[in-house]
Amino acid sequence: MLLDEQIVAIERGLTQADVPHAFGGAQALAYYGPIRATHDIDLNVFVRAAEADRVLAVLAELGADVANPGLRTLIDRDEQVRIRWDATPVDLFFAYDALHRSAMERRRRVDFYGDPIHVLSPEDLIVFKATFDRGKDWRDIAGIVFACGEPLDYDYVRRWLERIDDDERRRITRFERIVATGGAELD
C-alpha cells in the first residue's frame, strides 16, 4: 500500500472509531509551507495514553504491526511510539493536555488527493515543531512563515511558546527572528 493510501486508511479508520486525531509532520506541512519528501507518517492522537488500545486496535485492523509486547509501556512512559505498517514508520503522539486540546479544536479538514483528512493548523504545527527544536523543524517553521497562503496567528504561537520554552527563551527568540525576517533567518 502506498503512503497516501495508508494516510487515507488511517483517517477513515480513526474517524469511524471516533478517535480525534490530526496528521502533522510533512503531511501537514504540505498545506502551509514547502512540500518536502517523507517516508513516515506523523499522527497526533488527541486521547490520553491510557486510551491507546483503541488506536492500536484500529491500526492493527488496517495491517500495522502493533504486536510488540513493550509497546504499551513505551506509550505509557513517553506518550509516543513508532510502529510500522509494512515499510512505513508511523509515529504516534498521544496527549490530552491543554496544548493538545487546543490543537484538536483548531485542526483543519483538508482535501488529500480527493479524500478529506485532518491536519494540524499551521500555528499548532509551528508550536509542535518548536518543541522538538531540531534544525529541520526550524527550517519547516521558516517555510510556514514564509510560504503560508493565509495570515498566521502569531499571538497564539507566542502564547504557547512562552508556556513551553526554557529559561533562556531559545524557542521564542528563534521564532521571533524568523518572523522578523519573513522566514529568511534561521539562526
Image: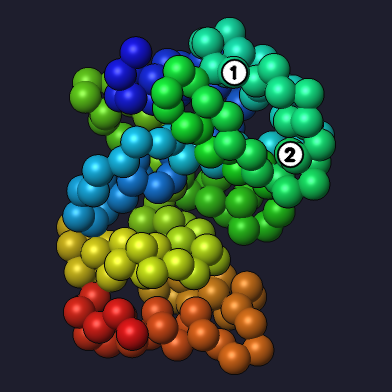
Q: Amino acid at mark 2?
A: Ile
Q: Which residue is mark 1?
A: 65
Q: Is residue 140 visible?
A: yes
Would you identify the image quadrant in which residue 136 lies? bottom left
Which disc is residue 175 wearing? none
Quadrant showing the C terminus: bottom left
Looking at the picture, which amino acid does disc 1 mark?
Asp
Q: Residue at x 61, y 26 (%)?
A: 19
> Where's residue 178, x and y in %?
30, 80
Give me the residue at 38% from left, 69% from top. 135
Q: Nearer the viewer, residue 128 or 159?
A: 128
Q: CA distance from mark 1 to mark 2?
A: 15 Å
Q: Is 28 located above or below residue 14 in the figure?
A: below
Q: Horizontal placement of 5 versus 130: left or right?
A: left
Percent coordinates x, y for residue 163 in the rendering: 63, 75
Q: Nearer the viewer, residue 163 or 83?
A: 83
Direction from residue 115 to residue 137 in the image, left or right: right
Within the image, what quadrant is residue 162 found in?
Answer: bottom right
Give percent across and percent down for residue 164.
62, 73
Bin the neighbour count of mark 1 within 10 Å (Cα to Cα): few under 14, some 14-19, many 20 and up.
some
Residue drawn 31% across the image and 62% down it: 140
Q: Secondary structure at mark 1?
A: loop
Is residue 153 visible in the rendered image? The answer is: no
**Mark 2 lies on residue:** 75
Whole-percent x, y for residue 109 in the image = 37, 35
Give the mark, 1 or 2, whose residue is nearer the N terminus. 1
Quadrant (top left, top right, bottom left, bottom right) of the N terminus: top left
Please give the count of numbered marks on the rendered protein.
2
Q: Give the colour scheme shown.
A: rainbow
Quarter of the rendering containing residue 111: top left
